[in-house]
């Protein structure tokens, strides 16, 4: 397991541009899905699917990345049931979301 070097909290959104980072991460997922499956999906559709799924989990504890994974899987299942596609979408998301923050 990798050693954690830093944990940061930006509750007042003054350290990095969360929305910009998230949108770029979702754009990376959209590009990945189009290349790997032919699924054409927009950042807005990815946002909406995740938000819709979160409503079905109200009142239950759920890891936010698990919810994100479930939202990606719901698009992938329309064309494929290959687990590696979902894993690839999560990798594309995480590479941007956690490693390419847009600092203020």
Image (spheres, helix red, strand yellow):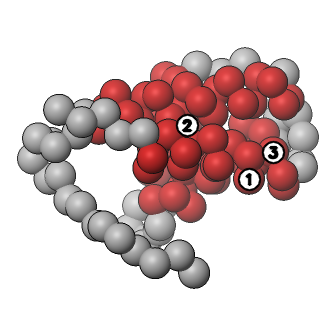
Q: Are marks 3 and 1 in contact (CB under 8 Å)?
A: yes
Residue 14, numbered circle: none
Distance Cα–Cα, label 3 vs label 2: 17 Å
Q: To which residue does mark 1 refer? A: 87
Q: Quadrant of residue 22?
A: top left
**Quadrant where the image shows the C terminus:** top left
Q: Which residue is found at the position 85% from the left and 29% from the top? A: 37
Q: Residues within 10 Å of mark 2 (few under 14, many from 20)?
A: some
Residue 4 is at least partly visible in this image: yes
**Quadrant where the image shows the N terminus:** bottom right
Distance Cα–Cα, label 3 vs label 1: 5 Å
Secondary structure found at label 1 = helix
Q: Which residue is found at the position 49% from the left and 22% from the top? A: 44
Residue 49, numbered circle: 2
In-front residue for pair 30/102: 102
In the image, is 50 to the left or to the right of 59?
right
Q: Position of residue 27 (x, y in %)?
A: 55, 25
Vertical relation: 2 (above or below) 82: below
Look at discs 2 and 1 and give the one toward the viewer. 1
In the image, is 78 to the left or to the right of 88?
right
Q: To which residue does mark 3 refer? A: 85
Q: How many marks?
A: 3
In the image, is 103 to the left or to the right of 96?
left
Residue 72 is at least partly visible in this image: no
Q: Which residue is found at the position 55% from the left and 45% from the top? A: 95
Q: Are marks 3 and 2 in contact (CB under 8 Å)?
A: no
């Amino acid at each position: 397991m990798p050693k954690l070097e830093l944990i940061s909290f930006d509750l007042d959104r003054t350290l990095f541009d969360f929305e910009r980072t998230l949108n770029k991460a979702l754009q990376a997922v959209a590009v990945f899905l189009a290349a790997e499956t032919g699924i054409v999906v927009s950042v807005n559709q990815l946002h909406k699917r995740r938000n819709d799924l979160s409503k079905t989990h109200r009142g239950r504890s759920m890891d936010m990345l698990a919810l994100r994974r479930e939202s990606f899987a719901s698009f992938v299942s329309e064309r494929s049931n290959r687990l590696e596609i979902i894993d690839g979408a999560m990798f594309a998301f995480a590479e941007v979301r956690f490693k390419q923050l847009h600092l203020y």
